[in-house]
């Protein structure tokens, strides 16, 4: 008699716990390129990881005046690396990606300033 009650209790606990597991918060970001350069690569890395994840653009490019929507990202803080058509890198650390509807607009000045900061950080 105790075994079915124990099994039923465990099953109820599992079912009650499933929504919190399945409801891991997701985010979406739209990257708008208003710079003079195409963005050829877009990498994310959780801030507590030293390695970059896969190129989020795959075979795509974010052309000048174009945008790219990245969806279904785990809600967290990430380091972001963009690589432009000249293979110049821009790294921004500790970007909070949480929720949907975020839009990042990249201008030429933003990209140049970030590239300089990234190069200076690499020299240290």
Image: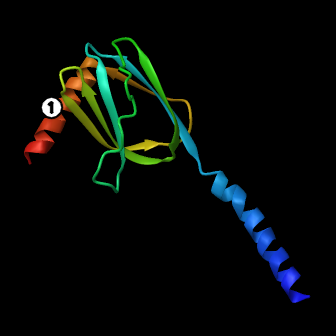
Q: Residue furthest left?
A: 123
Name the residue rendered at 19%, 30% in the picture. 115
Image quadrant in which you'd find residue 65 = top left
Q: Dot 1: few (<14), some (14–19), or many (≥20) neighbours within 10 Å?
A: some
Q: Is residue 38 above or below residue 49?
A: above
Q: Which residue position is annotated with label 1?
A: 116
Residue furthest to the bottom in view is 2
Q: Where in the figure is residue 94, as x and y percent of width and height? A: 35, 46
Q: Is residue 39 above or below residue 98?
A: above
Callout 1: SS: helix
Q: What is the image's colouring?
A: rainbow
- Residue at 56% x, 43% y is 26
Measured along the vertical axis of the image, is residue 29 above or below residue 93? above
Q: Which part of the image, by quadrant, shows the N terminus?
A: bottom right
**Residue beneath the point at 9% across and 48% down:** 124
All told, the count of numbered labels is: 1
Q: Residue furthest right?
A: 1
Position of residue 10 in the picture relative to residue 41 (left or right): right
Q: Residue at the location (77% across, 75% down)?
A: 10
The location of residue 83, given as percent across then percent down, is 25, 29
Towards the viewer: 88 or 97: 88
Q: In the figure, is residue 49 to the left or right of 19?
A: left
On the image, which quarter does residue 109 sit in? top left
Location of residue 5 (image quadrant): bottom right
Residue 101 location (% of width, % of height): 55, 30
């Amino acid at each position: 008699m105790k075994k079915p009650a124990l099994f039923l209790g465990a099953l109820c606990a599992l079912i009650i716990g499933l929504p919190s597991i399945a409801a891991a918060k997701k985010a979406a970001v739209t990257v708008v390129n208003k710079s003079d350069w195409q963005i050829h690569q877009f990498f994310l890395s959780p801030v507590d990881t030293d390695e970059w994840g896969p190129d989020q653009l795959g075979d795509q490019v974010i052309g000048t005046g174009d945008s790219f929507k990245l969806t279904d990202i785990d809600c967290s803080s990430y380091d972001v690396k963009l690589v432009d058509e000249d293979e110049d890198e821009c790294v921004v650390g500790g970007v909070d990606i949480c929720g949907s509807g975020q839009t990042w607009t990249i201008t030429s000045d933003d990209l140049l300033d970030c590239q300089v900061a990234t190069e200076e950080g690499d020299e240290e």
